[in-house]
Amino acid sequence: MDYKEIIARYDGKVGGIIEAYHALLREFSYLPEEAIAEAARVFKLSTAEAYGIATFYSMFSVEARGKNVVRICESAPCHVAGAADVVAALERELGIKMGESTADGKFALEFTECVGQCQATPVITINGKPYLDVSPAQIPAIIAEYK
Amino acid sequence: MVNLTIDGIKVSVPEGSTILQAASEVGIKIPTLCFHPDQSIKANCRVCVCEVEGNRLLQAACAMPVFEGMVVKTRTPKVLEARKTILELILSNHPQDCLNCIRNGNCELQDLAQEYCIRENPFEYKVRGFAKDFSTPALFRDQDKCILCRRCIEACSVVQSVNALGLEGRGYNSMVVPTLGKALIDSPCVMCGQCIHACPVGAIGEREQIDEFLAAVANPDKVVITQIAPAVRVAIAEEIGMMTGEMPMGTFVQGLRQIGFDYVLHTNFSADLTILEEGNELLKRLKEGGTLPMFTSCSPGWINFCETFYPDLLDNLSTCKSPQQMFGALAKTYWAEKMGIDPSKIYSVSIMPCVAKKFEAARPEMNDSGYQDVDLVLTTREIGRLFRMSGLDFSKLPASDFDSWMGKYTGAAVIFGASGGVMEAALRTVYEVVTGKTLEDVNFAATRGITGIKEAAVDLDGTVVKVAIANGLANARKLMEQVRAGESPYHFIEIMACPGGCIGGGGQPITKANVKRVERIEAIYAEDEGLPLRKSHDNPEVKTLYEEFLHEPLGHKSHELLHTHYHPKNKKFL
């Protein structure tokens, strides 16, 4: 769907720009410059302000990235539970480093702050869906769901 | 009124006052960085913290409202220690190259580091290491120096409605960046330079061109000439430790000769000329049904703004070049011929209160003399540095006069430096041209002052001409929206990009508070008041120019040299 149509759906809504950005992410996985400028126009902000909002929240990305966003928590409880090993497994499985996207555009690999599932660390999320008590051995199977 | 005690001193202030305001009433200075007297409260730097009895945590004096019976302590050991730590944290990633910084000696952070005896910083020193932005010919940005106070953002958005600057990221990673994190030239920046005045440190500054000037002076083949804009004299005094307006014109001229100018001329000459061209253009538009309201075109920040945000209104802009560019085009034609100087040898320097003038002089279309009309633009601040570099004592310097041809001017030209001045100067001339009568009282009170939007109506023998004046681009935007909607009641609109007009320009001595702008405005009108000639059409050199060279306003030669056209900027992101 065209970014203009996506943004127009939230026109007039209080705080609509946040919802519009989420909807744009579902479609493009990131916020293209043109979409930020269009959101600024629709929500009567300057492009500089709309860009400020787009970069303030870590869930949003202004850089093009893979379609399926894999995020791993880097907060203390996950760290203690062996997140570093999970990171290594993810990097190995996807063939990319943290912060990168796969060449086929299917996966992006990012850190996240705590997602509130500290009872079952380490935690990863894929497109917002949490995976709990993750071990390096499980990674290939989890990733395979999205291939 | 609210009664409180600050450091044991009783003070009574209006309800809604802050601790900072109350403290200043009794002469207690609380340090600030993000605070700006003409802006909203930001309270992000925290350096103004104080103890308030009954509060467990320290409070920011710039933001905390006073209450009845409040007891404030502004300099307890706890407070001093906290402020020192805050400064140390800010300094831990602030480049410590003060000696090379454009704001050395005029930096709010440097002052506080001094006041708080910051010696050895316990925090790890790590500069972020961003590349400097030299993408515009007028301004540079040094991201590493930014202390995130956000004063530039407010100047750019609220005062100027340009919105070229915003925040990116959050927390430790936040940065002030041009639109979409791009280079400044790709943002809607109009190069007015108001962000320079807002910046407490050296994160934004003018593109300094002192070396280029010194190279020209050192070149024996160059005849280095200068023109001075009217707003420069009133403010240059501030750069060399004198009071605003205190620099006598003759001493200023002598100073310019001393730093190497071969001929000292005046932009005021071409300001008078602008009035004749622009006044006649207005009359022509009124008579022949041309595009109205007509907008003035002297302020290059405003021209950039109109080309960026209102490309549909470019026909409303007067086709007159700015006084700087009229002077530039004439210097290498009329003046060169009259003086018997080869124009290819002339190095034409203009001294301006403005950074956008650097951009204007570099516009590719500004070469109607057959050469680049103006070779170099130096701001008031750069001239101040050259004066200090040359070790001149202005209290002892003998006066000198402007050189002849393009050095004479009237009071009408002087007031170009203040918001409303171009309008008033135009009215003085247009009135006499239209009515054939002598204007007895040349003072138009309604056009004067720092008020954002001013308006007046003038009766020209039965025809009422309605005029409006805006200073500061957010005010200009209001008038432009009216014009765009077809609801503007005016015939003639003067716009100056900077608050207060050129006296508040981006190249002037660093001006934090608007009260300084008001002082400079007063100095401008005092100078006008003291001059024998106060109407542009009375300027004898301008009369000669028309007799010998131009022949008539809006004539063939005028169109060739003194008029221009404008181009939509087509910026991708606004």
Image (cartoon, rainbow, N blue to C red):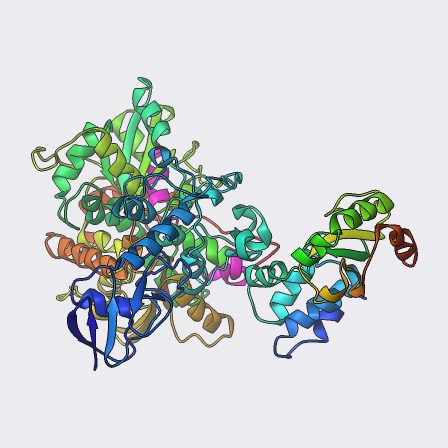
Q: Nearer the viewer, residue B348 or B458?
A: B348
Image height of B136 relative to B463, above or below: above
Horizontal and vertical percent position of residue B302: 42, 56
Horizontal and vertical percent position of residue B14: 23, 79
Q: Quadrant of the C terminus of chain B?
A: bottom right
Does residue B69 show up?
A: yes
Horizontal and vertical percent position of residue B58: 35, 65
Q: Residue at x 16, y 66 (%)?
A: B26
Q: Is residue B319 magenta?
A: yes
Q: Nearer the viewer, residue B79 or A46?
A: B79
Image height of B92 relative to B277, above or below: above
Q: Residues in magenta? A: B308-333
Residue B8 location, quadrant: bottom left
Q: Residue furthest top?
A: B220
Give left or right: position of B318 versus A107: left
The secondary structure making up most of the magenta span is helix
Q: Nearer the viewer, residue B177 or B566?
A: B177
Give left or right: position of A61 versus B105: right
Does residue B460 show up?
A: no
Q: Is residue B85 magenta?
A: no
Horizontal and vertical percent position of residue B348: 33, 32
The number of numbered badges drawn on the structure is: 0
Residue B282 location, quadrant: bottom left
Residue B9 location, quadrant: bottom left
Q: Quadrant of the N terminus of chain B?
A: bottom left
Q: Nearer the viewer, residue B488 or B158?
A: B158
